[in-house]
């Protein structure tokens, strides 16, 4: 389909793009920058409505994009993640001096994330991932007078540039072998056995680039420093947004690579899954900064999600999507509490959480629920996600992977319960109550409801994902 005819299927993306430029213009005239944040939320709402009523089309913009049910699912993921991030950003105090263009950048980010979910063309995959990466670099270093923020942005840029170079080289090999940038054409060309060695090298290089976005070991080294130095609202977004879309791209590419590499590909993913969850969990044990702790937790969660990728069938893909849905609610919820505490104490040390159960019982109970969900304790969303990926790997006969994941889950429970112990069993150093801004409270209620509902009534969510996950 040509570009003009394709635009009618891209109304949500057009809303996001137009809204971003409109906010940049209004920034010159509106003194109260919170209004820009509310306008950005309105644009997200309009994009969600357009996505709900938009039709499915197999090929858009001359075959560069595919608007299928898979794209729709991850489009909703992207819009929901950005909406919650904008909501919690409205009350994040360090942003007060720099709010103007912040909301416009997040609308551009939502646009870029939806492109990542829809791309079926190698060059567009690279451009979409780089679009997300450049915006991420800007957002990480957004607090321009904060040395940690600037340092984190530079580290992120350096690691990201290397990963992008590796991924682009892998893409060039696929193009050289197939003579095409279209994934469907590449899939047919790679059927010939003589292309197997090249396919292996190209797949490894591409996996390195995507592995950086999903903080997969050994490409995870950037995550702890970047997550700690970035504004906390941006950290919350980075742990779920680019990660979810990175897995979307990996699932697209998997449909090409897996038929030709088969068990070799699956074996590599199993090793990387075990390595990722083990490094993330073991390193998290010693962390005293909650942002670094949740950063290593995020690395470990990527390892669990890779379990579903390793299975490489419809059951595994469904498990990945449900796990991502549960993870989005749970991790954003945990970071919402982190922002509330950070606003009050101006610190992210675990000491700030001492005696939280007495000073703010609801916040302590909410964070406990989110941590238990991350640990995979029933009846919460995280348990459903872990149950499905465990069921998928056991059904596929990957018992070693299942045992390694179970042992890692026990390790993860230790450091999650460590935070709970600090909140409930360590006395507080002061007794003053902790104020809670309305946007943060609203976001907390939404995320708490999602975490509990997915755990208690999982069937509707699983069925909805199954109906949309076909690729």
Image (cartoon, rainbow, N blue to C red):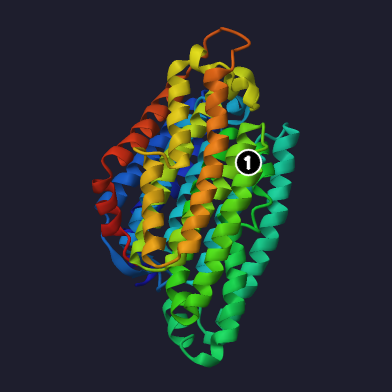
Of 213 and 121, nearer the camera is 213
Rendered residue at 59%/76% (across/down)? 202
Residue 316 in sight here: no
Quadrant for the C terminus, please.
Answer: bottom left
Asked if residue 224 lies left or right of residue 260, the reply is: right
Task: Between residue 208 and residue 218, name the one nearer to us.
Answer: 218
Q: Is residue 114 above or below residue 229?
A: below
Q: Nearer the viewer, residue 101 or 328?
A: 328
Q: Is residue 205 visible?
A: yes
- Asked if residue 22 is positioned above or below residue 87 in the image, the reply reads below
Q: Position of residue 387 (x, y in %)?
A: 37, 50
Q: Residue at x 72, y 54 (%)?
A: 158
Q: Toward which corner of the image does residue 61 lie, by quadrant?
A: bottom left
On screen, 109 above or below 247? above
Callout 1 environment at 10 Å: few (<14), some (14 to 19), or many (20+)? many
Q: Position of residue 410 (x, y in %)?
A: 52, 43
Tag 1, which secondary structure? Answer: helix
Left or right? Give the position of 40 relative to 72.
right
Q: Residue at x 66, y 62 (%)?
A: 163
Report the quarter where the N terminus lies.
bottom left
Q: How many marks?
A: 1
**Which residue carries the number 1 mark?**
284
Location of residue 5 with respect to 390 vertically, above or below: below
Picture coordinates of residue 76, whole percent (x, y): 36, 49
Residue 70, image x, y percentages: 35, 61
């Amino acid at each position: 389909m040509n570009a003009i005819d394709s635009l009618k299927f891209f109304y949500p993306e057009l809303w996001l793009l137009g809204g971003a430029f409109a906010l940049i213009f209004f920034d010159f005239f509106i003194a109260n920058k919170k209004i820009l944040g509310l306008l950005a939320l309105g644009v997200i709402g309009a994009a969600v409505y357009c996505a709900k009523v938009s039709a499915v089309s197999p090929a858009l913009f001359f075959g560069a994009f595919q608007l299928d049910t898979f794209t729709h699912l991850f489009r909703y993921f992207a819009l929901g993640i950005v909406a919650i991030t904008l909501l919690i950003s409205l009350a994040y105090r360090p942003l007060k001096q720099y709010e103007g263009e912040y909301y416009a950048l997040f609308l551009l980010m939502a646009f870029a994330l939806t492109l990542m979910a829809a791309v079926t063309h190698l060059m567009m995959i690279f451009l979409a991932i780089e679009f997300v990466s450049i915006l991420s670099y800007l957002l990480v270093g957004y607090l321009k007078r904060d040395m940690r923020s600037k340092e984190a942005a530079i580290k992120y840029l350096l690691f990201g540039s290397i990963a992008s170079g590796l991924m682009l080289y892998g893409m060039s090999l696929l193009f050289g072998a197939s003579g095409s940038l279209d994934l469907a054409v590449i899939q047919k060309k790679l059927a010939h056995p003589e292309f197997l060695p090249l396919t292996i090298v190209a797949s490894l290089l591409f996996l390195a680039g995507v592995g950086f976005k999903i903080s997969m070991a050994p490409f995870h080294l950037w995550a702890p420093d970047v997550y700690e130095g970035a504004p906390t609202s941006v950290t919350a977004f980075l742990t779920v947004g680019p990660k979810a879309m990175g897995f979307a791209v990996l699932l697209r590419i998997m449909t090409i690579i897996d038929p030709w590499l088969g068990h070799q590909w699956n074996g590599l993913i199993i090793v990387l899954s075990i390595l990722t969850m083990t490094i993330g969990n073991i390193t998290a044990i010693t962390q005293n900064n909650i942002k670094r702790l949740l950063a290593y937790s995020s690395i470990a969660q990527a390892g669990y999600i890779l379990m579903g990728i390793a299975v490489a069938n419809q059951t595994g893909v469904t498990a990945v999507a449900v796990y991502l849905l549960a993870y989005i609610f749970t991790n954003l919820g945990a970071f919402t509490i982190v922002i509330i505490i950070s606003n009050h104490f101006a610190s992210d040390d675990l000491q700030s959480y001492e005696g939280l159960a007495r000073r703010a019982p609801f916040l302590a109970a909410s964070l406990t629920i989110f941590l238990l969900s991350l640990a995979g304790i029933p009846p919460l969303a995280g348990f459903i996600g872990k149950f499905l990926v465990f069921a998928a790997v056991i059904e596929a006969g990957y018992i070693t992977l299942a045992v390694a994941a179970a042992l890692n889950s026990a390790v993860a429970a230790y450091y999650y319960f460590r935070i709970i112990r600090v909140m409930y069993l360590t006395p507080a150093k002061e007794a003053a109550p902790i104020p809670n801004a309305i946007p943060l409270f609203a976001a907390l209620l939404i995320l708490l409801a999602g975490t509990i509902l997915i755990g208690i009534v999982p069937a509707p969510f699983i069925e909805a994902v199954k109906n949309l996950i076909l690729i």
